[in-house]
Amino acid sequence: MNKHQISFKRKRIDFLSEQDLDTDFSAYEVEFYPDAKATCICCLNTDAQFIKESWRDVMDFAVNDYMVNNLSEFEAWNTYLVFLSHQELEKEVQYEIENDKFSMRKLFIQISERYAEDSRDAELISLLNKKLLLHDVDLGKGAAPASEPEKNISSISLDILKKGLAGERNKEIKNSWLESKIADRKNDEN
C-alpha cells in the first residue's frame, strides 16, 4: 500500500459487544475527508445458517443502535454491513442479503478456514480494502507514481468542501447555497 492510499482502520462501536448473539462483531472506518467517512460493521460467524436466519436481526441492531446516531449524510449513505463465514452461503440467500436496499449496503464474504484469530483485524482490514476500496486493482502498471497525487476537484466541489456542506443534512442550507450558485451562473452568462 502506498502512503497516499486510504485504508480501513479499527473503529469502536459499543453496541456490538452488547448484543446477545453467538457471533463476533467488529467495526472499521475509512476517512476520505474529515466529513466523509465510511463505516463497515462486520459480523463473523462460522455457521452460514446463523447468517441465513439472523441477517435481518443483525441489520436491525445496526440500524437501531448505530445508524440513528448523529452520522453525517455521507456516512449514512456509506455504511456497510459485511457478513463473513467459513461456510458457503446459499446463492439465493446471498443474493437476497446483497440486494436488500434497506438502510445500508450489505455484503457476504466466505473466508477460508485458515483465518487466524490472532491476526483477524489485519486480515479483515486487508479483505475490506480489497472488496470495498479495490486495493487490488492496478490502474497503471509501469507508470511511475507522482510525488504527490493530483487532485482533480471541480470548483463547485471545492466550494462544497470549504463551506462544510459535504455532510450537511439541512436542506434549507443546501438549497440556499445551490440557489446562489445558479444565480452566479446566470449572471456570468449575461
Image (tube, rainbow, N blue to C red):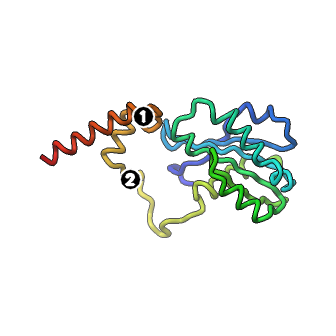
Q: Is mark 1 on a helix, strand or loop?
A: helix
Q: Mark 2 points at which residue?
A: 150
Mark 2 vs mark 1: which is more N-terminal? 2
The label nearer to you, 2 versus 1, is 1
Q: Name the residue under label 1.
A: 171
Quadrant of the rendering where the N terminus is positioned? bottom right
| Residue sitting nearer the eye, 132 or 88 | 88
- Count all numbered tags in the image, as a single digit: 2
Alpha carbon of mark 2 to alpha carbon of mark 1: how far? 32 Å
> In the image, 102: left or right of 53?
left
The crowding category of the residue bearing disc 1, from other C-alpha atoms within 10 Å (few below 14, some 14 to 19, many at least 20), is: few
Horizontal and vertical percent for residue 24? Answer: 81, 43
The reply to whether callout 2 and callout 1 are in contact (CB within 8 Å) is no
> In the image, 159: left or right of 11?
left
Horizontal and vertical percent for residue 21? Answer: 85, 40
| Residue sitting nearer the eye, 17 or 3 | 17
Three-letter amino acid code at the position of disc 2: Glu
Three-letter amino acid code at the position of disc 1: Lys
Horizontal and vertical percent for residue 185? Answer: 22, 45
| Residue sitting nearer the eye, 98 or 84 | 98
The crowding category of the residue bearing disc 2, from other C-alpha atoms within 10 Å (few below 14, some 14 to 19, many at least 20), is: few
Q: Residue at x 27, y 36 (%)?
A: 180
173 lies above or below 6: above
Q: Is mark 2 on a helix, strand or loop?
A: loop
